[in-house]
Image (spheres, grey):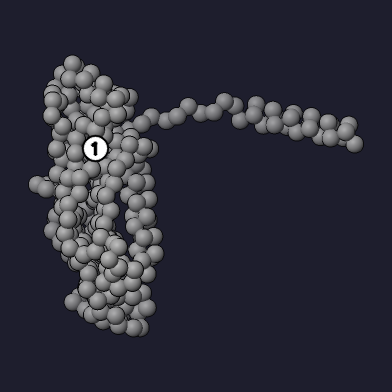
Amino acid sequence: MRAQIAFSLACLTLATAAVAEESGPPSPPGPTYLPAAVSLSGSAFTYPNGNVVQGGINDGSVYTFGAGAGTPYAGGIVSWGNSGSLAQLQLTLTPDASAFASTTQSTAGRSSAGSALGYRVLLVANDSKAAADIAARIDNGDALANVSGHWNLGATGYGYSSVQAVTSANVPNANLQTAAYHQCGSYGHLADASTPGCGGGSFSLAMHFVSTAAMVGGNALSFVSSVSLYANADSGIANGLLTYPGSATAFIDPTITLVSGLNAHLIVGDNGSVANPVPEPSTWALMVGGLVGLLAWRRRAAR
């Protein structure tokens, strides 16, 4: 019996070695890219006149499925549906970054809107001495900027809303990440006093950076971080046969402030670039998709 076991183990060892020899050494990690300068995306869902309309914003372009069409996007509010079932989105970067979502449901069904704005923030040292100082601060774990802003949430009837702001430095792994999240609702557990509730408030997040020297498109003088904003609003219920009227609004905006003593300047979004950076589309797609999924899970949990 022991001989059989030993023989089996020997065969398994040989087979494993053969597979390892065929597969060869592991592939080296691929290059790291600077994140895309700006990402504008959103989704909308309404039931106007009993019809289903789905749409959204993808890289600043409006798309629509079903009856009706979204209005052209040029930094303004985009609308789907009608006054009985309406979903609206707005995403802006200049002159001030903000994300906005709004829904109104006065007929049977549900309206839902969610927007996501992501943008790159470059910290560019004015000379090599300043770059060395910034690198030393990063090695020390210092935050080199602060993201602060305001949020406003509203909900009536069967409605709820949420906002989130995220800063991330280690692209694409997002190891140095800070976030602020608020939600509001007029029914269910969101109406409980233990939640932040509806109204307005402010947030403040520490902002970390990493060097772009080893990134495709980066250089020794530049350091990168990112800011992402999310606004979500939902009204009514998913059952399209019943009427549960409600409305919801969500708005959030940030301002970036550098810490004192830095001999450097900021380049926000697509207002400039360093060394013709090459964006990696999957970077923002993964982050936006993951966090929007998190908010969707929180909304479902709220019900």
Image quarter where the C terminus lies is: bottom left
Q: At which x and y percent is residue 71?
A: 17, 64
Q: Residues within 10 Å of mark 1 (few under 14, many from 20)?
A: many
The residue at the point 37 percent across, 46 percent down is: 286
The residue at the point 30 percent across, 24 percent down is: 139
Closer-to-camera residue (44/245)? 245
Q: Residue furthest front?
A: 193
Please, is residue 10 above or below residue 43 in the view? above
Q: Quadrant of residue 159?
A: bottom left
Closer-to-camera residue (40/8)? 8
Closer-to-camera residue (130/31)? 130
The residue at the point 34 percent across, 51 percent down is: 291
Q: At which x and y percent is residue 124?
A: 18, 27
Q: Quadrant of residue 43?
A: bottom left
Can you identify the residue that label 1 sits on?
Answer: 207
The residue at the point 19 percent across, 35 percent down is: 145
Q: Quadrant of residue 128?
A: top left
Q: At which x and y percent is residue 127?
A: 15, 18
Q: In this orientation, does residue 279 appear?
A: no
Image quarter where the N terminus lies is: top right
Q: In this orientation, does residue 30 appear?
A: yes
Q: At which x and y percent is residue 297?
A: 39, 60
Q: Residue furthest left?
A: 95
Please, is residue 92 above or below residue 239 in the view? above
Q: Secondary structure at mark 1?
A: strand
Closer-to-camera residue (279/262)? 262
Give, as a three-letter code, the residue at label 1: Met
